[in-house]
Image (cartoon, grey):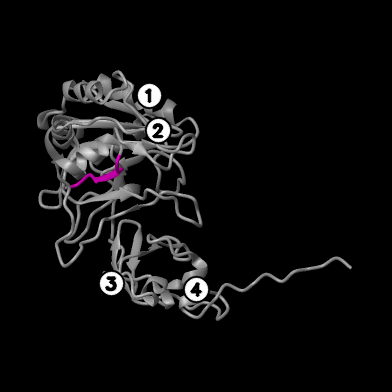
Amino acid sequence: MDHRLHATAAMAESFYQTFVNRRAYTLQSARPHPETGRHYYYRPKARDGNSLPALNLETVRQHLAGEITLGIYAINPKTQRSKWVAIDADYRDALVDLLKLQNELNHDGVEPALEKSNRGGHLWIFFEEPALARDCRIYIYHTALRLGLPIKGAGLPEGLEIFPRQDQLGEGEFGNAIRAPLGVHRGARESRGRRFWFYGADYTLEDQLAYLGKLRRVSAAQLATFIAGRSLPEEFVQHTKRPEVPKRYFVAPSSEFRILNYVEVRRQVGRNWIARCPSCAAASHDRSGDNLAISVEEPRKYICWAGCTKEMIRNAVGRPIPKRKEVFAS
């Protein structure tokens, strides 16, 4: 099914003014990963010695048209501010929790927009002027906890995910991207290439953008009132920053494969360490050295954005995956 729509420059301008905090962005892969079947996000690379691609109106228009799918960042690192807060909920009863939160925000005079998703939704709150990321987080964390809603992290594997995910960003950091609204979600389980719309308007780009433009924005004075005398709950405070590069990985049995023992980590982006893919390198590819992503939380998990399988990566470092022994019945 073709999910492409006609998108104009005016639509792109409206979207840009509402959602774009910085010009860095991610793209959802058009093809599923051969090993997992998932459509992962990646940051576009610089080509031919040029600087990294920056988000512009044409890129946004392509997203709205369904030609590409964007991920956008919450925080502008120059100001540590965001135009919006997004609450992502994707678990059982997630939509019920988002409706509770939406109702509570309405009592504060806030008009959030509820966007559909696979199992739950995304609740978006917009500001008259970009607000400090930390202040945004204080308001939503306290509101959600007051309602007894689960928040992912602090020991909970499932719950609300609040964007911005960080209080502030350091030099060269990006934070966590979220799928940009009104585009095509290529990884949607129920229907590949499905669009998820906002509930408050007809399902056309023109009506959706008009609806978003009319929503009441939260003023700086309102936000200051909401968070007066409050701080981020202790269990969610970012006490220390994880080292950007692992200096040494713990000793493991010689039979246990650890990808960090075979690559040089270049930097940390969000929840992943970034390195050059050994398989790509063997084929004289990945000259920028950032095709391989390794989970910070679970370093056994790694993936090549260019599509190299684990078998290819293990072969490239001289540690092929052992073949399973076949057992025959006597």
Give, as a three-letter code, the residue at label 4.
Answer: Arg
Across and down, in percent, residue 52 comes to: 18, 59
Across and down, in percent, residue 323 comes to: 64, 72
Above or below: residue 115 compared with residue 153: above
Residue 68 within the magenta-colored segment of the rendering: yes
Q: Secondary structure at mark 1?
A: helix
Q: Mark 2 = which residue?
A: 117
- CA–CA distance between discs 2 and 1? 14 Å
Q: Nearer the viewer, mark 2 or mark 1?
A: 2
Above or below: residue 285 compared with residue 182: below
In which quadrant is the C terminus drawn? Answer: bottom right
Give the mark nearest the N terminus, 2 or 3.
2
Give the mark nearest the N terminus, 1 or 4.
1
- CA–CA distance between discs 4 and 3? 19 Å
Could you classify mark 1 by the number of other residues whose Cα lies within 10 Å: few (under 14), some (14-19), or many (20 or more)? some
The residue located at (41%, 28%) in the rendering is 97
Across and down, in percent, residue 217 comes to: 16, 26
Quadrant of the rendered image containing residue 58: top left
Magenta extent: 67-75
Give, as a three-letter code, the residue at label 2.
Answer: Ser
Q: Mark 4 = which residue?
A: 314
Residue 137 within the magenta-colored segment of the rendering: no
Give the mark nearest the N terminus, 4 or 3.
3
- CA–CA distance between discs 3 and 1? 47 Å
Q: Secondary structure at mark 3?
A: loop
Give, as a three-letter code, the residue at label 1.
Answer: Leu
Give the mark nearest the N terminus, 2 or 1.
1
Q: Mark 3 = which residue?
A: 287
- CA–CA distance between discs 4 and 2? 36 Å
Q: Does residue 132 appear in this view?
A: no
Give, as a three-letter code, the residue at label 3.
Answer: Arg
Quadrant of the rendered image containing residue 206: top left
